[in-house]
Image (tube, grey):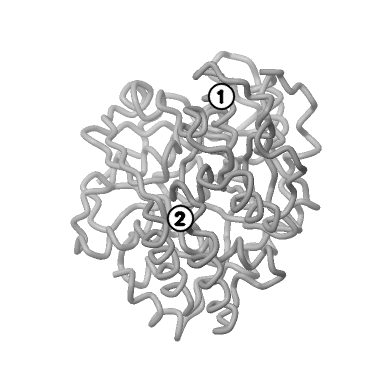
Amino acid sequence: MTQDHTPPQLRMLAPENFREKLSRRAIFKMGTAAAGLAIVVAACGGDDDASPSTDGAPDTTDGSPLASGDWSRVINAASGTLAMYTWGDYNDPELVGKQAEGALGVTMKVDYFNSNEDLITKLSTSGGSSGFDIVAPTGPYIPQMIEKGLIQKFDKTLIPNMVNVDQAYLAQGWDPTNDYSVCKNWGTTGFIWDSSVITRDMVTWADFFDACMDEATGMCSVLDTGPNLWGAWCWANGKDWNSTDAADLDACEAFLVDELAQHIKKFDSYPSTAIAEGAYSLSMAWNGDARQAFYRIIEAGGDPSVWKWAVGGPVTELWMDNYCIAAGAPNVEAAHAWINWECVPEISIQDLQYHGYHTGMRDMPDLISELAPDLDRGEIIFYSDSQVATMSTQEITSAIDRQVEMLNRMKAKAGA
């Protein structure tokens, strides 16, 4: 793979309108929206392996100073098993394996969900006994999770490294005081395609749908989440994906079920591995998983140069996933220790290099320059203010059940 050594600073600054986009759009709509979700049914904070920085630039783990000023690196010890329920391929395997055991003293068990609806259903039906310690919902879903008692408040004295998170990614509308959540990653949605099969330029969601029903028919995958499919139809047709307009919902369902479904090979929220195996020639994907596909294509002996990535246009999604602690978590101590550890700059950037999503750390350009100077395909991770201006955050509306029903009807029609 050709290394991209273009200085990333121009792309990775926290976009000025990021906070406005999330806070203005991503607030849970009470009233009818709450009714519409019927389908979704003692710690050791003082134990340090490295002292928090209070005066001057601290050393990194290899002894070299970071240029970014003071950073907190409190490492809280824990013990036992730490169970996390999260999105697929969302953490560096080394971090959730040997490194977590060595640094925190825990053995991790990680399970995966395909959508926020799946996560909420799992927690709702468990009656507080899901067995999970940490979950990673997308921001707009957090208010209903608080209301339903699915997540619990942090003991923020056990997460001192939260000061390392950029202010742009804190105090969002769904949790203004960060009592229940802290940014894990943020990103967007687009599509990746084999340009030896689809030789035309691909820019918009209309292009995606057209190619799925033409050159890529039977070799196309879409995300296994109703809101994203509804969103893509809206973005392709100049509609607001936070609308509850009945005529738009009917038109979308008619298209997805009667026209698109027969061309879909699989509903796959993590298509990178299957792409590398030759299963798809066009896939709807979150940006980090699309970036993973390029590496997996190389590992499988394929040619990554024929694969192209595009952020969906003219509008697409802006999302932020968050670390939360599940209600009834069996190992609350370890949950806090993990979240705190993930807010250490070196750990955060190690994770970023694996999963390919912006982790929300402050002074990100300096961190990348110091800790990951050879970062590859940064253009799939970092987005400019003008790019973020084309992105729209989901609102949880009374149409959420209908969006899930559309997905189920598509699956039945596709037989996938």
At horizontal 58% and vertical 67% (from top left) the residue drawn is 26
Q: Are marks 1 and 2 in contact (CB under 8 Å)?
A: no
Q: Nearer the viewer, residue 218 or 41?
A: 218
Per the image, label 1 sits on a secondary structure element best described as helix
Callout 1, which amino acid? Answer: Tyr
Give the total of numbered labels: 2
The residue sitting at 70% across, 53% down in the picture is 207
Q: Nearer the viewer, residue 224 or 49?
A: 224
Which residue in the protein does label 2 denote? 181
Q: Residue at x 55, y 53 (%)?
A: 320
Cα distance in 3D space between marks 1 and 2: 31 Å
Q: Is residue 239 above or below residue 292?
A: below
Q: Quadrant of the N terminus?
A: top right
Q: Position of residue 17 (x, y in %)?
A: 74, 58
Residue 296, image x, y percentages: 52, 25
Residue 153, placed above or below residue 375: below
Q: Earlier in the sequence, mark 1 or mark 2?
A: 2
The kind of residue on which mark 2 rests is Ser
Residue under circle 1? 295
Residue 233 x, y percent position in the rendering:
61, 65
Query: Which residue is nearer to you in this view: 393 or 251?
Result: 251
Q: Is 388 left, or right, of 157 in this rendering?
A: right
| In front: label 1 or label 2 | 1
At mark 2, the secondary structure is: loop
Above or below for 7 versus 316? above
Label 2 crowd bin: few (<14), some (14–19), many (20+), radius 10 Å: many
Which mark is on residue 137? none
